[in-house]
Amino acid sequence: MDTQSYKTKSARKEDVVRKWYILDAENQVVGRLGTRVATVLRGKHKPSYTPHVDTGDYVIVINAGKVRFTGSKMDQKEYITFSGYPGGQKRTKAKNLMVKKPTAIIEAAVKGMLPKNSLGRTMFKKMFVYAGTEHPHVAQKPEALTV
């Protein structure tokens, strides 16, 4: 019997075919939206998924300024940044960050769901978040992605 036909195929970065997806974040819950985006960025939605290879696709998220939180997270959730200097820690409430930089909310949610290594940083670069409906990736002909 031929054992070669039973071997698991590991994807190579040269063989990965990447697609473009667009996701409308209007009225979507941040966490559920983030898990869907992180899954596509990692490539876990494909049968060719390999943990040590970036097999994921590109994701464009539009209407990031219209996402929502459940419960009272909009008033209570804090995003913390640290400059590395003493007294350099800053805390920002979700409602203030939504006004100032709405794309940062989705970026923080997805970044926390990706691997914390160089592979995760490469995957994160394939995500493009826009506060409004306009985006410069029309030439890539992105397919609609549902949450």
Image (cartoon, grey):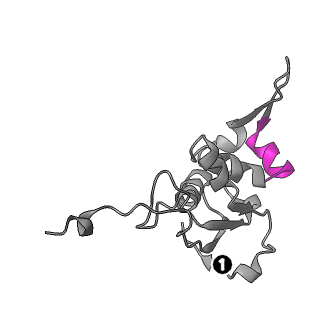
> Crowding near pointer 1: few (<14 within 10 Å), some, many (20+)?
some
Residue at x 76%, y 75% (from the top left corner): 137
- For badge 1, the amino acid type reads Pro
**Residue placed most toward the observer, 101 or 113:** 113
> Is-magenta flag for residue 99?
yes
Residue at x 61%, y 41% (from the top left corner): 117
> Is-magenta flag for residue 28?
no
Q: Quadrant of the C terminus?
A: bottom right
- Relative horizontal placement of residue 12, taking residue 129 as reference (left or right): left
111 shown above or below 66: above
Specify the quadrant of the image occupied by residue 13: bottom right
110 shown above or below 84: below
Q: Which residues are magenta?
A: 92-102
**Residue placed most toward the observer, 90 or 126:** 126
**Residue placed most toward the observer, 113 or 79:** 113
- Relative horizontal placement of residue 49, taking residue 5 as reference (left or right): right
Q: How many marks?
A: 1
Residue 83 x/y as whole percent: 83, 28
Residue 109 x/y as whole percent: 64, 47
Residue at x 76%, y 49% (from the top left corner): 104
- Relative horizontal placement of residue 45, taking residue 31 as reference (left or right): left
Q: Quadrant of the N terminus?
A: bottom left
90 shown above or below 135: above
**Residue placed most toward the observer, 72 or 143:** 143
**Is disc 1 placed on a helix, strand or loop?**
loop
Residue 30 x/y as whole percent: 62, 53
> Which residue is denoted by mark 1 in the rendering?
142
Residue 139 x/y as whole percent: 75, 82
* Dominant SS in magenta: helix
Return the residue found at the far top.
86
